[in-house]
Image (cartoon, rainbow, N blue to C red):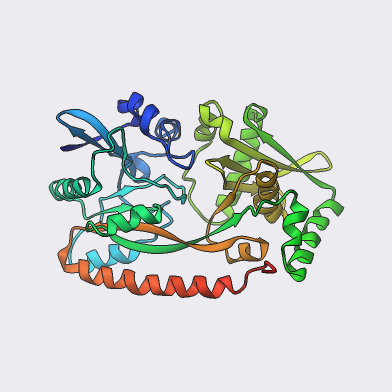
Amino acid sequence: MEINTISSIEEIKLFCKENFFDNSPFISYEFFRELETSKCTSQSNGWLPEHLVIRNNKVLVGIIPNFKKNNSNGEYVFDHIFANAYNQIGKNYYPKYLSAIPFTPVKRNKFFYTNNNKVSLKDITKYLISFFSKKEVSSFHINFIDKTMSDELSQNNFSQRLGMQYYWYNRSYKTFDCFLSSLKRTKRKSIIKERNFLKDEKIKCIVKTSNEITSKDIELFYRCYSNTIKKKWSIHYLNQLFFEKLVKSDLKNQMVLIQAFKENIFIGCSLHFIGDNTLYGRYWGALQEVPFLHFELCYYQAIEFAIQNELKKVEAGAQGEHKISRGYIPELTYSNHWFESQELKESINIFFYEEGKKVKETIEYLRKLSPFKN
């Protein structure tokens, strides 16, 4: 078995079209291609594509999406503490390797995508560790991976780290009112009050999918997205060209754009993607400050869409305890990590263990705040 890197997903286009897919629409040839061609993943922003390709007897059998990182921006699994630790012992933390969906904290079931089911994870991890040592990278990180895969990786020298996100689940609701009826009285009244406020302000929402989304819609969306970035003093990880390319790709069929209008004047929107029985809320923004508009565009409209389309789950992005009162439940997320430094490895594993206990305790506490009757 041999491991090499490629600088573009385009180099193995046919293999990816046949084998590079997962539970979310973000693991796809099109999504990674548009990130590359729009220069969102590049050396200049610290996300240099160095996808790992595995060959057996010179025949391509698998790919691991991977980036050579010169910073920790846009990852959502925060590791600055490790960069500081490396610095304290006189070693460089960057460059590091990261297997993740760029700028997207979405769980995936796999990290190795293959056309050969006989390739074992144990063999892959063994070859990977040897490969990383030759490459002289400080570490390798696999972000937002399914628990089953994460547990298996942790048994093969890739330490497990826990995190937390909030998900909404469709309990076979027929309508949004059915969902509301499952909530405790105070929580139900609060949501009704927020939605009625927008109705009184004559704000209406329009849902567009697939070919209904135009280039003008993308232009308006990007203005909103940019406005959100500025307010958060954040970084423009994604440019307008990326979204323009997305809406011209096959992924357009999985896009859901929810627009808000006040008396026919556009004021804001949110952009979502449909995966396997899941709606992924990704980006939002507004051109006017309107109370409760964020909740409407990102949560309530997403829930309504999921119910109407019989989707089982809504993932509305990272962070946000305010999601709990709106029906989103805290759950564990998993990532796995390999570090070159034997000097730090034991300390890092102790940190992961203690951090994991705190995360579990937090989730246990937050679940007591559930808005549901039962």
Question: Residue drawn at (58%, 66%), measured in percent from left and top?
Answer: 321
Front-lying residue, 151 or 346: 151
Residue at point 46%, 51% (across, down) = 105
Picture coordinates of residue 42, whole percent (x, y)? 35, 38
Choose between 26 and 266: the one closer to the eye.
Answer: 26
**Image quadrant where residue 211 sits:** top right
Q: Position of residue 176 (x, y in %)?
A: 74, 52
Looking at the image, is 88 positioned above or below residue 294?
A: below
Above or below for 255 versus 135: above
State the residue at coordinates (67%, 28%). 212
Visible residue check, residue 277: yes
On the image, the x and y values in percent for residue 41 come to 38, 39
Extreme-top residue of the structure: 14
**Residue 189 left/right relative to 12:** right
Q: Quadrant of the C terminus?
A: bottom right
Compared to residue 348, the image places residue 26 above or below, namely above
Task: Where is residue 179? Give x, y as percent.
Answer: 72, 56
Q: Nearer the viewer, residue 324 or 278?
A: 278
Image-based side of 23 in relation to 138, left or right: right
Residue 286 in view, yes or no = no
